[in-house]
Image (cartoon, rainbow, N blue to C red):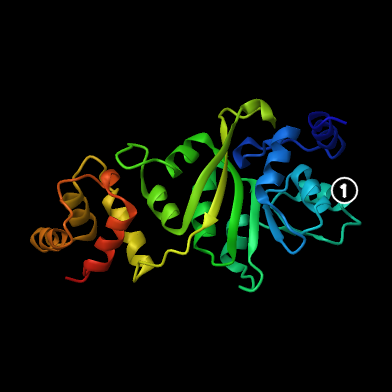
Amino acid sequence: MRLKEETEYLCEKYNFTPKREWGQNFLIDQKILKRIIQTLRLTKEDIVMEIGAGTGILTEKLVQEGVRVIAVEVDKKLCKILREKFKNTPNLEIREEDIEKFLREEEFSSKRPLKVAGNLPYRIASSILLTLMEKEWVKFMVVMVQREIGERLIAKQGDKKRGVITILANYYTKISPVMNVPPQAFFPLPRVSSTLLEIKRRGRNGVIDKSRFSLIVKAAFSSRRKTLENSLSRALRIDKNYLREKLSQIKIDGKRRAETLDIEEFIKITNTLNLNC
């Protein structure tokens, strides 16, 4: 049975209507599924957390690889479908939970880092990615996101699409686009195109205080039309004279805008500024 027909059959059998507001668009393209599995580069020792297991199309491919799979799905009806479809699958654990709550509460042993796969819900994709990137137990991800988010994640210096998520995500990880995915690869048809990303954890540890780093990056982009000096001064309530002095010490022109800075420059700012002055 073709994947679109299989998905339609399951929706009819379980009286299930995909919720657009939850981003329930299910992948139905075999070639893209194969590309996801190839990009994950799975070994028998891997543990894979799948975000938004849906009707189990990717789940099935993952369990066939012989890896341990933790499938996180918030929808009760979809979890019922998954439990019946995979009732005799010992290497699969189905978690009926909201992914944001799951990531806040769940911790995994650092001895068994996870790989992550899935089609991230568009409305919360950015926040999920940033949470995952900060988790030491996530070593590698292959995820589908809205193409607009993908473009922001890989935006270069000077690009207007460059923003908070660009800097924070690329501090923790190296992000590579795998392929663009058209709406026709999903059922039901979404309104936007998607991008498949490969995300690897970096060994970067240059920031002394990661919470301060996040605060400074957000402040720098808080007024995109303003200069770095004005944005930081206003958002962090820092004296401009002090700010100019500190930026001068690290040879960063305060008249630049945030999107022109590279990550190393944000690290220097973070490690130099005293936010209590």
Q: Is residue 148 above or below residue 81?
A: above
The x and y percentages for residue 126 are: 49, 48
Residue pictured at 40% horizontal, 40% vertical: 155
Residue pictured at 88% horizontal, 31% vertical: 1
The x and y percentages for residue 231 are: 21, 50
Q: Is residue 163 visible?
A: yes
- In the image: residue 123, left or right of residue 269: right
Q: Is residue 120 visible?
A: no
Residue pictured at 89% horizontal, 55% vertical: 87
The x and y percentages for residue 124 are: 53, 47
For the residue carrying disc 1, how many other residues have a C-alpha within 10 Å: few (<14), some (14-19), or many (20+)?
few
- Residue named by callout 1: 85
Q: Quadrant of residue 107?
A: bottom right
For the residue pair 62 and 23, the one nearer the viewer reads as: 62
Residue found farthest to the left: 241
The x and y percentages for residue 15 are: 82, 37
